Amino acid sequence: MLKMILAISAATIVAGSAVADEVWTTPIGAVIYERELPNGDAVLSYPGIEAETRGLAYIHGLAQVYEGRGAFSGVWIEPDLADGEGCAVAIADPESGEARNNWGRIDLVFTEPDFPGGWVAIRGECFVQPDAYLIGKPVVAEGVE
């Protein structure tokens, strides 16, 4: 019985790490490739404004693309702000369907076309043209380049 539990646990860990094996360092903290959606979006998480929260970036067309990466676009969503500030128009969270007022557009351009590669992200709030830059550098295991 113990062997079965350990085997299931190991399989779960291996399956879960297949996608979340890309991490980038940025000035705001670690950005993590969390998961892929059936519609082709890759979901990246990043540190939110509050320490215990993480924002999510839904990058269109990035799922399953590990070579020949170029420019991608998407949306970012963070938990709604307690003071009610945010966008005048809500969008539906791509996973939960909940209305969100704290969101915006994001463009992600890879600086190297193949895994592991860095990127430059440009984001804007709501419908505003993205203009805030963030640079991500890949975290790689020792001896791996």
Image (cartoon, helix red, strand yellow):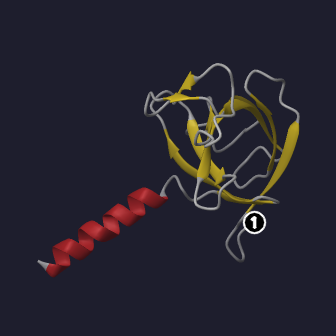
Whether residue 91 sits left or right of residue 29 in the image: it is: left
Q: Give the number of marks.
A: 1
Q: What is the three-letter code of the residue carrying label 1?
A: Glu
10, above or below 33, in the image: below
Residue drawn where x is 56% and y is 33% of the image = 41
Q: Position of residue 116 (x, y in %)?
A: 71, 55
Question: In which quadrant of the rendered image does the N terminus lie?
Answer: bottom left
Q: Residue furthest bottom?
A: 2
Q: Is 39 above or below relative to 76?
A: above
In the picture provided, is 38 more to the left or to the right than 80? Answer: left
Crowding near pointer 1: few (<14 within 10 Å), some, many (20+)?
Answer: few
Q: Secondary structure at mark 1?
A: loop
Residue 61 lies, with reference to residue 33, above or below; the image says: above
Residue tagged 1: 145
At 25% across and 71% down in the image, what residue appears? Answer: 7
Q: Residue at x 50, y 46 (%)?
A: 35
Q: Residue furthest left?
A: 1
Q: Left of 29 or right of it: where is 120?
A: right
Q: Position of residue 75 (x, y in %)?
A: 66, 31
Quarter the C terminus occupies: bottom right
| Extreme residue toward the front, this view | 83
Q: Measuring 42% from the left and 57% from the top, which residue is drawn there?
A: 16
Position of 3 relative to 37 (above/below): below
> Which of the pair 10/54 is nearer the observer?
54
* Percent of width and height locating residue 40: 53, 30
Quadrant of the rendered image containing residue 82: top right
Task: Report which quarter residue 110 is drawn in.
Answer: top right
In depth, the one of 68 and 27 nearer the eye is 27
